[in-house]
Image (tube, rainbow, N blue to C red):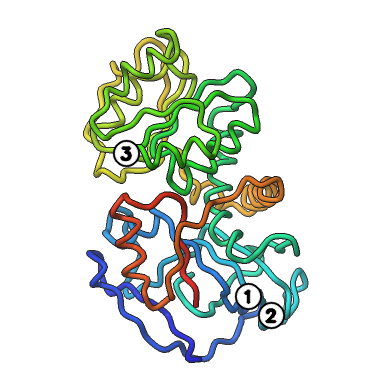
Amino acid sequence: MTDIAVSLLSPGGVDKFQVSEQPELQPGENEILVRHEAIGINFLDIYHRNGTYALPSYPAILGAEAAGVVEAVGAAVETVKPGDRIVYGGTPGGAYASKRLLPAARAIPLPADLSSKIAAASLLKTMTAYMLLHKTYPVEAGTVILIHAAAGGLGTILTRWAKHLGATVIGTVSSPEKAEFARSHGADHLIVGRNADIVSEVRALTNGKGVHVAYDGIGGDMLVKTIHCVRPFGMAASIGQAAGPIPPLSVDELRPGKSLSRPSVMAYVAETSNYREAAEAAIAAMKQGIVATIAGEYPLREAAKAQAALESGKVAGSLLLIP
């Protein structure tokens, strides 16, 4: 079978992808050559494709997480060897390909009891959940949290991990079907519908107090509503903008005593020590069953179709590309 890569020619729609044959690759001194078995798809990939988050140059190969088998290693690499199963997430991009060169320091050993598909669908999202639940705002027993898009790939993992920590989870979803899906992953309360009065419903569910922390990956006008759902001295974490750019925000929205955070998992795990810590925590969580639910698999050459499906908002769970 011919090895291929899916390149983004310029920012825009899914028509900007091009499938081409891959050349032979030789790892540099501190690199490894990985043959992918499964590639995770994230909203981050869509932000890179449409130009929300600009890339340094084009054409570019997207993709921030994948799992596979090491085929060759550079002369200075001692941490992994050919034949090892590994998973990786975060920078640098380049996962939308049959194989790739990867800095050896980014390779995370994959335990025998975790499949490549589960690992590729879960690692980056689980590292994000670790950052949000343990670093951004420490969540513990009794914490009340709000998760937007609770039936999505990150939303389901956040819910599972937060429940493991003893938190109460309020989730928002767009449909009754997604509400059932989110409930099956542990959500305590669901607010259903794109036009729901989220602020009023959160206040009713919390006896007027609001949540301790809210995670908003919707963006647009939703962020102000999210802040209004937070109790005094609580936090709103802005983690995406699926609905579009966030308009200017007055600091008065943070009264009385609320805080606003805009954490970036890509920035957090760019530092190797943070990356190893988050990845080890993510692997441990995955072994406890805190994993993504795989909603669909697409051949690698159908990356455009897979991104369009994710962008439609109809997917409950995570999607994979299979080389």
Mark 3 nearby-residue class (10 Å; few <14, some 14–19, many ≥20) = many
Label 1 vs 3, first from the N-terminus: 1
**Along the polypeptide, which appears first: circle 2 or circle 3?**
2
| Distance in Å between CA atoms under marks 1 and 3 | 43 Å
Residue 13 position by quadrant: bottom left
Asked whether 266 or 28 is in front, the reply is 266
Q: Position of residue 306 (x, y in %)?
A: 36, 65
Q: Secondary structure at mark 2?
A: strand
Please, what is the three-letter code of the amino acid marked with disc 3?
Ser
Q: Nearer the viewer, mark 2 or mark 3?
A: 3
Q: Which residue occupies the foreground of this view, 43 or 56?
A: 43
Which mark is drawn over residue 73?
Answer: 2
Quick check: 247 above or below 128? Answer: above
Q: Secondary structure at mark 3?
A: loop
Left or right of residue 70: residue 192: left
**Given contact means CB atoms under 8 Å apart, are the residues at marks 2 and 3 in contact?**
no
Residue 253 place in picture, x, y as percent: 29, 18
Look at 65% across and 29% down and name the residue there.
Answer: 165
Question: In this picture, is 193 found above or below 64?
Answer: above
Residue 36 in the figure: left or right of residue 22: right
Left or right of 62? Residue 77 is: right
Q: Which mark is residue 31?
A: 1
**CB-based contact (under 8 Å), mark 1 and mark 2:** yes
For the point 71% across and 50% down, the residue is: 287
Kindly identify the amino acid type of the residue bearing the numbered disc 1: Glu
Kindly identify which numbered label has been placed on residue 75: none
